[in-house]
Amino acid sequence: MVGRTLREIRGELESLAVADGRYYVRCGRTGERPVPVDELWFPDRSAAVEAVRVAHAYRATLRRYDPRAPWYDFVVCHDVAGAVFEGLSESDHDGVERSVMDTYLEAAEATPDRDRLCLALLRTMAVELRGRLPVESQAAVLDAATVHLPAAETSASPLSGALDHLRSVSLLDGYTVLGRAEGTTTVRLSGYELDQVEGSLPTLPVSVELLRRSPDRALVVRRAERVGRNAWLVTLTSTDLAASPVSAPVRAGH
């Protein structure tokens, strides 16, 4: 056979993987994690993007042996996006799950940059969950999602640990805690990768990371205000039971 063997390609793919990775690869059309990426995790986005290239090479070689082997549209998924999708799949909200997938697939067809599809999935989940489920059900889906995530470090405060993690996976450039008063915390987020949609800022990844670190008293973003390009002033609370954990209303700046 001309070119590399399946074993050689699989070896290259496994060399990119780590046991405690934060990213994985799945099919953007079906949501599956087929061979050869079915059980592999990758340490960062660049390694996962490279894994997409190798996985396509593997499937192309496989089709030389069996032309009937299905074709998959591999995309990079961050662990938060994948965990929330798993939590949603395990719930009884089938209509929401189908809507999320349908909207995401439309975005996949319109998004040439495959590295941005994970952000599209997070944004879609936030919009669909907020629009279709009450706050209590939104929280239950996110709580179920944390079961599919590794245990979080407990050395930092829940807020600092959550935001540090989002910064480490390039969902956030930086943050500054500006103050705490009367059950609320005000934080400035810089370089936040998710922009507002329909008057709300998707905060789903923030809430999931906070839940991982403080499941009994998790903070949620109650409101957000744009203060610059990809910069937001957000107010978090642990006492407002009516606040959505997946997105926060955006108020006009001064």
Image: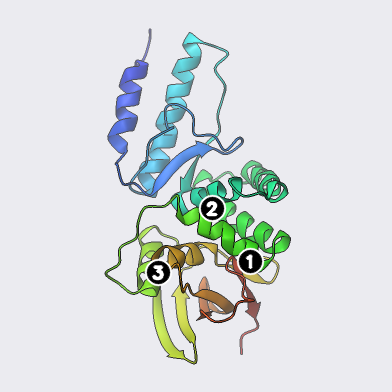
Q: Secondary structure at mark 2?
A: helix
Q: Nearer the viewer, mark 2 or mark 3?
A: 2
Sequence order check, earlier mark of 3 and 1: 1
Residue 201 in which image quadrant = bottom right
**Farthest residue toward the top?**
1
- Which residue is tagged 3? 163
- Which residue is tagged 1? 136
Badge 3 local density, few (<14 within 10 Å), some, or many (20+)? many
- Which residue is tagged 2? 84
Q: Amino acid at mark 1?
A: Glu
Position of residue 157 relative to residue 127, above or below, is below
- Along the horizontal axis of the image, is 167 left or right of 77? left
Residue at coordinates 39% horizontally, 80% vertically from top-left?
Answer: 176
Sequence order check, earlier mark of 2 and 3: 2
Quadrant the N terminus occupies: top left
- Along the horizontal axis of the image, is 234 left or right of 174? right
Q: Nearer the viewer, mark 2 or mark 1?
A: 1
Badge 2 local density, few (<14 within 10 Å), some, or many (20+)? many
Q: Which mark is residue 26?
A: none
- Along the horizontal axis of the image, is 77 left or right of 129? left
Relative to the observer, which residue lies in front, 39 or 46? 39
Q: CA distance from mark 3 to mark 1?
A: 24 Å
Relative to the observer, which residue lies in front, 179 or 145? 145
